[in-house]
């Protein structure tokens, strides 16, 4: 009887360990903390295809005030962003008009990063498209200095 009970316990332990190991890996392999369960990665080279900027009013983006609304041409355009994840931080290299600038953004939450007073929020990632919200001067008190932008990228 004891032998049968020990075999039953051993079988139960094997089944539980197989069940746990089969669930150990998330369906979201991109390391960006979400993105709707997609396996797309934010990392890589992205070409800025459009940007739309809004003013700021009463502590939030003013969607009725468009300050910039631009769509850019083909992939030969120099508006290139290269994104890498380093631990919890995001390293952003921006190439524009022959100049390159690198920024280190610190993780601020799920798909949310910050640099100084600016905020960078990943809204959606697909294999060939990326949409981010950018908040200029988000962490300042003066609404007159704040802006909100939506950037759309393609690979």
Image: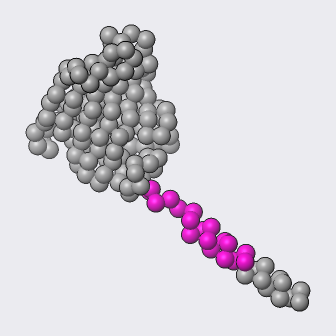
Q: Is residue 34 above or below residue 95?
A: below
For the view shown, which residue lies furthest in the right direction? Answer: 2
Q: Looking at the image, which is closer to me, 59 or 10? A: 59
Q: Where, quadrant-wise, is the N terminus in this rendering?
A: bottom right
Q: Which residues are magenta?
A: 12-29
Residue 150 visible in the shown view: yes
Q: Is residue 72 above or below residue 63?
A: below
Whole-percent x, y for residue 44 in the image: 31, 47
Classified by dominant secondary structure, the portion drawn in magenta counts as helix
**Does 24 appear in magenta?**
yes
The image shows a total of numbered marks equal to 0
Quadrant in the rendering for residue 112: top left
Which residue is drawn at the image coordinates 33% and 15% (left, top)? 57
Whole-percent x, y for residue 72 in the image: 13, 36
Left or right of 12 in this view: 41? left
Q: Is residue 54 above or below residue 105?
A: above
* Visual colour scheme: one colour
Whole-percent x, y for residue 121 in the image: 38, 35
Whole-percent x, y for residue 89 in the image: 47, 37
Which residue is drawn at the image coordinates 39% and 10% (left, top)? 142
Q: Looking at the image, which is closer to me, 78 or 54? A: 54
Which residue is drawn at the image coordinates 40% and 51% (left, top)? 36
**Does 155 appear in magenta?**
no
Which residue is drawn at the image coordinates 44% and 56% (left, top)? 29
Q: Looking at the image, which is closer to me, 92 or 70? A: 70
Quadrant in the rendering for residue 46: top left
For the view shown, which residue lies furthest in the left direction? Answer: 73
Q: Is residue 95 above or below residue 5?
A: above
Residue 104 visible in the shown view: no
């Amino acid at each position: 009887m004891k032998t049968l009970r020990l075999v039953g316990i051993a079988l139960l332990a094997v089944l539980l360990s197989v069940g746990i190991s089969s669930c150990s890996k998330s369906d979201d392999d991109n390391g960006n903390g979400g993105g709707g369960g997609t396996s797309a990665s934010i990392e890589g080279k992205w070409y800025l295809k459009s940007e739309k900027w809004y003013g700021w009013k009463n502590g939030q983006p003013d969607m009725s005030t468009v300050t910039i609304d631009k769509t850019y041409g083909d992939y030969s355009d120099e508006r290139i962003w290269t994104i890498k994840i380093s631990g919890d931080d995001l390293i952003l290299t921006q190439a524009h008009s022959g100049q390159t600038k690198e920024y280190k953004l610190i993780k601020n939450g799920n798909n949310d990063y910050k640099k100084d007073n600016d905020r960078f929020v990943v809204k959606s990632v697909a294999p060939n498209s990326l949409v981010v919200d950018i908040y200029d001067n988000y962490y300042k008190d003066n609404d007159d200095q704040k802006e909100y932008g939506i950037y759309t990228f393609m690979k």
